[in-house]
Image (spheres, rainbow, N blue to C red):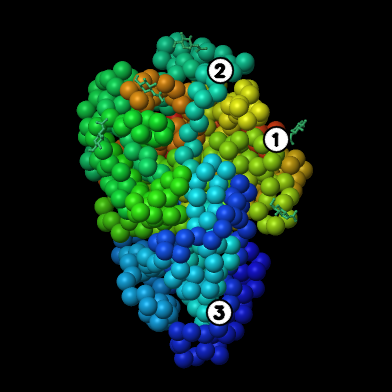
Amino acid sequence: MLGASILLTVAVAAQVVLATPIARSAYSVKETHYAPRRWTQKGRAPRGQMLSLQIAVKQGDFEELERNLYEVSDPSHSRYGQHLSHEEVNALVKPKDEALDLVHEWLLFNGVDKFDYSPSKDWINIKISVEDAERLLATEYSTYVHEDGTEQSRTTKWSLPLHLHEHIDTIQPTTSFMRAVPRSVQFKEFENVVIPADYKPPTDKTLARVCTINGTTPECFKTLYKTLGYKQKVPGKNKIAFNNFLGEVPIRPDAEIFLKKYEPKAVKGAYEFKFVSIDGGPQQDNASSPEQIAAGTSREANLDVQTIIGMTYPMPVIAYTTGGEPPQTPDAAAGDPPGNEPYLAWVTYVLKQRDLPQVISTSYGDDEQTVPLEYAKRVCSSFAQLGARGISLLFGSGDGGAGDIAGNDAELCISNDGKNTTKFIASFPASCPYVTTVGATQGFQPEVAAYRPANSLGPDGKLHGYYASGSGFSEYFPRPKYQDAAVKPYLKKLGNLHEGLYNPAGRGYPDISAQGLYFEYVWNATNGVISGTSASTPLLSSVLALVNDALIADGKAPLGFLNPWLYEKGYKGFTDILSGGNGGCNTTGFPVTKDWDAVTGFGTPVFPTIVKLAKGNH
Ligand SMILES: *[C@@H]1O[C@H](CO)[C@@H](O)[C@H](O)[C@H]1NC(C)=O
Ligand SMILES: *[C@@H]1O[C@H](CO)[C@@H](O)[C@H](O)[C@H]1NC(C)=O
Ligand SMILES: *[C@@H]1O[C@H](CO)[C@@H](O)[C@H](O)[C@H]1NC(C)=O
Ligand SMILES: *[C@@H]1O[C@H](CO)[C@@H](O)[C@H](O)[C@H]1NC(C)=O
Ligand SMILES: *[C@@H]1O[C@H](CO)[C@@H](O)[C@H](O)[C@H]1NC(C)=O
């Protein structure tokens, strides 16, 4: 990113010279980003292919928004809980008129006259062909193919007229290779359930009756985290939502089978949850089609919806489905927009809404290094806008320990800065400081960090089955102040372990954790088990949504952006996880320790204690 920051300085100097706005000043490179590992360039992108370009116009006053976010989220501040309105947030981030005028002028000059805006106009969306985008950005798009067959039209370098450099943060899709990859891990492909060698069943009689490690259920979670017997007081006022990308869609008849067996009182929930479809995201009421089954679609969506309804019924549940999935080969004739940016489409939609669910669970992510810095910052700042409005956003931390989301392979842990050094690979949006990131545990008395070593030989000659709670430190986002007291002592304990492999000055994650191994679920009308921080995230989101019920019923504000509260006092409502494995990049990964650690954060929830702590805020 060195190149980008140097160019920005040039642009500022140029602006002084170009006092009168002109549509065409000389172009200069705005951004370069290496194509991440596992993506191969395969010739020019089809020139007629349509792109949905998102232009990030510099926000008016993000620092002020951030200050507001921290004040309303900090329990020792007098404004705690006084979340901002839709209008207040938009007013803070709305770009300066000059910036919007110059961007419009440039687009009109280039024959683009149809725009779509985010509510504060900090994002401008245009539909444009590859050929026109190439002219607009003085670049060339290529087709890039991922090892798994996915194709995206991308470039590694693009330009802007000099006078626009200071007004536009980024334009995507250009250099971003990020995809919303589901965090759920299925072991069936290679092997079925394997009980960890050191596993001991719970000694507590009640727990022993409801919790078995080879198939965890809502009854087990409710007992373990002590939400059992809690009667909701304001379902309807209080809501929960979860995200679906990549064609994933929760299947009602599967949810019905699951709930009948594991949470019969909630069985109506299978037909009551609401779809909110964004950009043509799928919705359906019937069983999976043979095509969906053949493609393995909806495992993630089913896990999410079944966990959430099992834990929170009768709370209203919203399933966001965002379209624009990157199919294995984009079919332009069928209107598949190549390389859509799913988080952005989703967050842009959500930011337009006045009435939002108070907790939103997202079990998707990608390696941070697939996302260019400026783009990651803007997506992350959109999450801050939701936080300021009092929405809790939870993201899974990943399933590859300290490494790449895909597993424990040294070959996958190579830096994306042209130097090809071995590095732990952080995960995004998990690394964003304005979201709450969720790690995974297993076992019950005690719970330990979720870890499963690779143990079965796949057809590719490599060992598969590895899974470890995603952990680490951002390469992009510095450690936020609220983490200092918790993370600095952990860094001290690490000493020189893994020195050079991670960024000790970065935002550490996860923040908290929950069960994440062998969840019972139903897919293809069949019972099975599934694991991942994908499972932990909807589970923890459900517990926090119940906390919001207790708060709202008492006339108090919902939890909102959790972290400042969590790191100041909320952590006392979580059971510290003291042991368990990690790994990643063919190393031992990060150690699990007393107090906060980069594998399980502060640990797993104790519902009544969290409610007590949260109520004490006001
Ligand atoms: C595994 O599951 C079966 C029931 O499905 C149970 O009988 C058995 O005790 C479980 N094993 C462990 C180690 O929990
Ligand atoms: C479900 O409904 C959709 C359209 O509503 C249809 O295309 C699909 O074939 C149906 N699938 C099954 C299994 O009935
Ligand atoms: C880094 O790896 C890429 C892809 O394998 C290769 O093209 C490039 O030459 C390597 N760079 C260095 C400095 O080794
Ligand atoms: C889906 O269920 C059908 C009917 O039970 C079964 O024949 C088929 O093998 C299952 N498919 C997969 C991929 O599990
Ligand atoms: C992983 O580590 C082991 C032991 O340290 C070593 O034998 C092996 O070659 C390493 N594998 C890779 C791919 O680096």
Q: Amino acid at mark 3?
A: Tyr
* Residue at figure coordinates x 36%, y 20% from the top left: 526
Q: Is residue 431 something that shows in the picture?
A: no
Q: Which one is in front, 80 or 431?
A: 431
Which residue position is annotated with label 3? 27
The image position of residue 323, as x and y in percent, is 35, 49
Q: Can you tell which of label 3 and label 1 is closer to the viewer?
A: 3
Crowd around label 1: few <14 · some 14–19 · many ≥20 (10 Å): some
Residue 597 shown left or right of residue 64 in the figure: right
Q: CA distance from mark 3 to mark 1?
A: 44 Å
Asked if labels 3 and 2 touch by Cβ distance under 8 angstroms, the answer is: no
The image position of residue 257, as x and y in percent, is 29, 22
Of pointers 3 and 1, the one earlier in the residue sequence: 3
Q: Is residue 257 something that shows in the picture?
A: yes
Which residue position is annotated with label 1? 586
Of pointers 2 and 3, the one earlier in the residue sequence: 3
Q: Quadrant of residue 10?
A: bottom right
The image position of residue 336, as x and y in percent, is 37, 52
Q: Can you tell which of label 2 and label 3 is closer to the viewer?
A: 3
Tell me: is circle 1 under 8 Å from ligand 5.
yes
The image position of residue 417, as x and y in percent, is 68, 57
Q: Quadrant of residue 215?
A: top left
Asked if labels 2 and 1 touch by Cβ distance under 8 angstroms, the answer is: no
User: Which numbered marker is on residue 194?
Assistant: 2
